[in-house]
Structures are given as structure tokens and as C-alpha cells.
Image (spheres, rainbow, N blue to C red):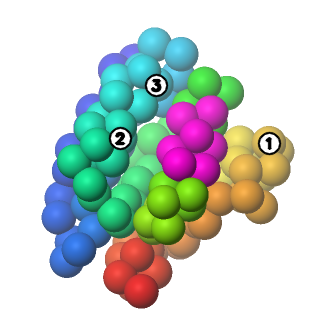
Amino acid sequence: MALTIADDQQGTAVVVGLSGQLDTLTAKSFETHLASHIARGQTRIIVDLAEVNYVSSYGLRVFLLTAKQLRNDRRAFTICRLTPEVARIFKISGFDKILTIHETLGDAVAFASQ
């Protein structure tokens, strides 16, 4: 299944909305997309997973590497609106403990604006 990526500026943060599956075939384009935001100096990134029904280990790796890079540069990175299926994957993998996750987009924007 394909992955659709769409950006929306919310104040000082960019919201990267995903739709579809984040798997071995689609994670590289997502990683490249996030890298382009980082290279342009974007300091606040929110990933909205409201329309994602699956995240593979490769997709989780992209989240982890991006979070580490942005944290090292003192930038904000958060994830929001996980579907029940994706929330289960994050919980089983322990990523719910190491990444900043918000239930709503509004909460994520407020966090990124701090």
C-alpha cells in the first residue's frame, strides 16, 4: 500500500501528515521527507498518524533516528493521533516510552510551540 505525505504549517511547527502504511517500501520516502525539513532548518516537526494503519520496524527506526537528531539540536519532534493499531505497535516496541506522543493535534502543536 502506498504512503501519502502532506505538510501543513501550524504556527512555527510543520505538521507532516501521513496516510497509508509506513513499511519497508514506504519508510525511505518518509525519511527523506523529514531529512529535507531538517536540512532546511525546520526546528519543530509534528508527525500526524491519524490515517496510518501500520508501522513496520523500518518505520519505527525513522522515528527514532529523527527524534535523536532533533533532540541533539534542541529541536521539537512529536507524534500525534495514533490509530489503535499503531498505538499497539508503539507500545509493544516500547517506543511509547521513548518518543513524545500526543493524543490530539492541538496538544502536539502546543508542545512544539514551547
- Nearer the N terminus, badge 1 or badge 2? 2
* Residue ID for mark 3: 27
Residue 42 horizontal side relative to residue 87, left or right: left
| The quadrant where residue 13 appears | bottom left
- In this view, the residue in front, 66 or 25, is 66
Identify the amino acid type marked 1. Answer: Ser
Q: Find the distance from the CA under tag 3 to the CA under tag 1.
A: 17 Å
Q: Find the distance from the CA under tag 3 to the CA under tag 2.
A: 11 Å
Marks 1,2: beta carbons within 8 A: no
- Classify mark 3: helix, strand or loop: helix
Identify the amino acid type marked 2. Answer: Leu
Residue drawn at (81%, 50%), measured in percent from left and top? 94
* Residue ID for mark 2: 34
Residue drawn at (34%, 63%), measured in percent from left and top? 43
Q: Nearer the viewer, mark 1 or mark 2?
A: 2
Which residues are the magenta region?
A: 61-69
Marks 3,2: beta carbons within 8 A: no
Identify the amino acid type marked 3. Answer: Ala
Residue 68 horizontal side relative to residue 106, left or right: right
Q: Which mark is residue 50?
A: none
Q: Main secondary structure of the magenta part?
A: helix
Answer above or below: position of 53 versus 69. Answer: above
- Classify mark 2: helix, strand or loop: helix
Q: Which mark is residue 93?
A: 1
Q: Position of residue 75 (x, y in %)?
A: 44, 65
- In this view, the residue in front, 27 or 42, is 42
